[in-house]
Structures are given as C-alpha cells and as structure tokens.
Amino acid sequence: MAASGCRGVRSILWKYGSCGKNFCVSRSKTVPQLPVRQICVSSSLWKKNLAAAGPQKFTQEFIDKQVEEFEVGKRHLANMMGEDPETFTQEDIDRSIAYLFPSGLFEKRARPVMKHPDEIFPKQTAIQWDAEGRPFHFLFYTGRQSYYSLLHDVYEKILAIERHQDKMRNKGLFTSETKQILLTGSRWLLKEEIEEYLVENISDHDYVRLIQLMEKLLSMPYCSLEEEFILKFRKQLEAQSSKHEIPALQYDPQGVAFSVADGRRKTAKASITLRDSGSGNITINGRNYLHCFPLLQDREQLMFPLHFAGALRLAISRALLSFVSEGEVERIRQAGLLTADPRIRERKKPGQEGARKKFTWKKR
Amino acid sequence: MAASVRHLLKPWTPSLCLVRWSRYNSYYLDPDPSKDARVPDSELSPEQKELQELKTVRRIKAALSSDTSSPFSDPLMSKFINMMMQDGSKILARGIMTQPREEIECSPHSVFQQALENCKPIIGLASVQKGGKSYQVPVPLTDNRRGFLAMKWMITECRDNKHRRTHMYEKLSQELLAAFANEGNVVKRKHDLHRMAEANRAYAHYRWW
C-alpha cells in the first residue's frame, strides 16, 4: 500500500481509497458505518516525475463515493448547527464552515471549503475507446470530437430548417414574419464557458467559427424551431439596475424620512445623510458648502470639480435611490452617477520622470 | 464561468504597460447625462430599441466631473475647454470660456457653434512621398478632424496673434464674432488651405486611400 514505484500520491490515494472501501464494507457488519476520510498525505512520498504523469484522473466510483460522503457530511453539519437537514442550502454550508473553521488567510482559495464534488473535481471525459482500442465516436481522430460533433449538429439543424422552408414554399405557406427568438438581454457563452460545456480545449478561431455558424442559424426565418437548442448557448444577463443596493429609508423622531449612503473617489470618503425636508441646505462637516470649498462652477446635482466632490456625488446619488422610483433609478444609473469611478493616480515607472513623462532623449 | 465575466467587470490593469489604456474594460458603456424626457418606445427605431435594451444589461462608466445634465453644458464647449486647458487647470480654461459668453450678448451658444462651423475646412492636405519628392495632396477630412482643426486654429490664433495688452477672453470673443461673420484670421486660414488644395488638385490621384 505504501509508495509503489514512481506513481507516488495517486496510487496511494487509489489504493488507500480502495482499501478504505473494503475496510468500510467489512466494518459495516460490526460497527455503524462512519464516513472514511483521507486525512493527509506526506509529501515525502511524492516522487520527482509526478508532473510528467499528467493531471490526476478520478474514476466514476471515486467521484460517486465523494458525492455520497458529501451528502452525509451535509446532514451531519446541519445537525451540528441545529438546522433542518432537508432544507440545508449551499449558503448555509458556507456559513457554517466559516463559523466552525474561522480562517485568517487572505487567499480565499486556501480557506476550508465544503462544496459538492462536481464543483471541486474537474470534469473529465470518459474513456473514448473500447477494449480493442477502437474509438466510439466517429470524429475521435479529429482530436476534438465534441467540438466538431457540435458543429455537425448545428449544420444538420440548418439543413433541416432549409428543408422545412422548402416544404412551406411548396405548400405556398412561406412567410418571413415568423416568430423570432428573443435575444435581447442575453449574450453568447464565452469561450471558457463553451470549453467547460464541451470538456475540451478550443482555440479562438474555433470559437469564432462556432459563433458564426450559430448566427447563420439565427438568420434563417424558421429558426424558432430550434429555439431551445440556441438558448442553451446563450446566457441571460440580469438587468444591471438591480445590482445597486438601495439604502433603506429611515425615519427621524419628527417623522422626517432620511437615508444614509457612502461614496469614495481616489482616497476621499464621504458619508451622507439625505433628508426629505426639502429646504435645500447642504452642510459639509458642519459648515455650509459655500464656505467649505469655493464653488468654482455652478452645477446641478452638486457635481463639483474636486476629487473630494466625486465621493460626495456618488454618496448623494446612492442616498437618492431610496427616494425615487424604479424608472428614475435606471435613469440615474445610465447617467453614470452610480458607478464608482475607478480612476486612480497612475504610478511612476522606473526609467521615466513620471507616469508618462520620459527623460530627455539623447541621441548618443 | 462566472469568474471569467467577473474579471471583465473589475477595474482593469494591464499586465504589460500599454500607452493608451483606461481603467474600464470594453464591457462598460459611455454614460448619457442628458436629463430631457425620453422618446416614447413606439417612436424608436429597432436599432435604438436594441441600444436601450443593451444599456439596461450592461454596466455604465462613471460620469465625468465636467459633464452635467444641465442644459448649459455642451459637448462641443467641453471639448474646446479641454483643448484650451494648459497644465490641467480646467478652472482657468473654463473661466476664459465663460467670459466671452458674457460679452457676446445675444445667444452666445449658437454664435460659438456657428463660428466654429464657419472655420471648419472642407478639404485638407496630406504629404505623400512619390519618386523621392513629397507632394501636398488634397484629401477629404473626417468630421472629427475638421472640428479639431477649427478649434485648434482658433486657439492658436488667440494665443499668438494678439496685441500685448489684450486678455485671452477678449481676443477669443473678437475672433468668434469675426468668424461668425466669415471674416477674421481663422477663416482666412481656412480659405488659404482651400486655395492650396485647389492649386494642388493635379496631384489628387496620388492618393490611394
């Protein structure tokens, strides 16, 4: 069971895993079954050419076992936290783990995590050839069978739609005003997302080709026949206005509504209380804004020229959200008042005077 | 997969030092500060409808400190002020711009626009090398280039050719009024350029673009 040849860790896991399984099976008759877990592996067992062996491969049984353990562990965790195991969601799991194993590590990926094995173990393709070495898929020798088979499928659908069009024309029922697929508010899947879907690596050129073919499919009048196929490759974008958090409206002892909001710009921070009284007075740090800094240009909506003022503008816009209607929120967002300005001072580079200014150029 | 979109939405710093780059990714759209009532949906063309839909799902860049939703702000005016600004003192440049507005009593906004229109050249000259000699070839100009040249000439004129004791804003107001009436040095410069282009029209076929 210990270090066998140059396979190192993987074989340990396998063998231990399989031993563990047998162990578990034999024990189940005598002792109530407990999940057997791999605690740690010593790095002295790792051999030098581990990298040459390629990425780790997990068998389907291994992954199924992990899923089983995860489900059991989830129930245990729910019981530990005193919550209902049936309605224990992933957010609850994350919260519980953060509570039970508080970590001060900065790197989020280094912190303890408990997720479904499908999210942790990368998706792998199953063995693609049979016992005699003959591949199952007819496009195996292209090297990218999923991608090319997808292209084939799309082209098949295009041909099917063309045949349907011809049939309609023959019957005399051909119209261009057919039901169009609604594409607004969605985008094509990115190259990374397609790679995840196909479990294969594709190049940029391949991705562009795929999108071109899908666009061709979309350009046909009867494309609504393949609507659900196309929508599989489109991702819905949520309306951005819902992303901005509207501060809650609070009430004074006098019954005057007010809202509090913060804003930041470069290194300035502003915290604002916007009251509903309607007098129009603006006080900054207790002083009137005219005294605070000179009003150089008259502006609406208090857009001042200093960076200090950018923080104020953002805070005021955020505080205003709780007083206005939905349509107005969208208008404010489209005017660019809710985006925090990401511009900062550009750093000075070595070999130059400043951020952009270079030293005097000398020919020799 | 959400991670790849998330990296598009963060303020972006390039791994290599590029010359022209911004902290926004190309995913962000430009803001629209106008406050006027929107055209109702029925009157929009399909492209405009698509643009509106796109705006609801895309992120918008932060508004510039110089743009407001007031009817007094003008993109042309902002551009002119930025061109006139030196060493980043926008306050001074803006002050110089608002003073001729006080001097020009009736409709300074339209006077300014008409004056710049009158200064815009229609055709420009480009230097083309052929057979060892470089020729000045008449070439059509894009709208942006024409507007830029008009503003540049106006500013250079006001800086260089003024009497010692006149202020910038006085000279600017004089030049704007002259340009409005199609007189003055800037319009003269435009006519000179047109004459040169006319004189060199024999070389027009040297242009290959």
Image (cartoon, coloured by chain):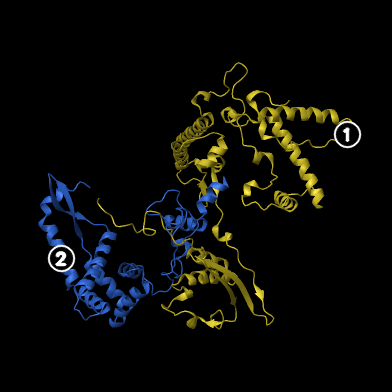
Chain colours: A yellow, B blue
Q: Is residue B119 visible?
A: yes
Numbered badge on residue A31? 1
Q: Quadrant of the N terminus of chain A?
A: top right
In the foreground, A348 or A315: A348
Horizontal and vertical percent position of residue B176: 24, 75
In the displayed structure image, the side of residue B160 where residue B47 appears, left or right: right
Instruction: Read off the residue under disc 2.
Output: B191
In the displayed structure image, the side of residue B112 where residue A218 appears, left or right: right
Q: Is residue B26 above or below residue B159?
A: above
**Foreground: disc 1 or disc 2:** 1
Q: Is residue A281 above or below residue A158?
A: below
Q: Is residue B124 above or below residue A328?
A: above
Residue at the image position 56 percent from the left and 54 percent from the top: A238
In the foreground, B85 or A179: B85
Residue found at the very far front of the displayed protein: A364
Horizontal and vertical percent position of residue A313: 51, 71
- Could you tell me which secondary element the residue under label 2 belongs to? helix
Residue at the image position 33 percent from the left and 73 percent from the top: B93
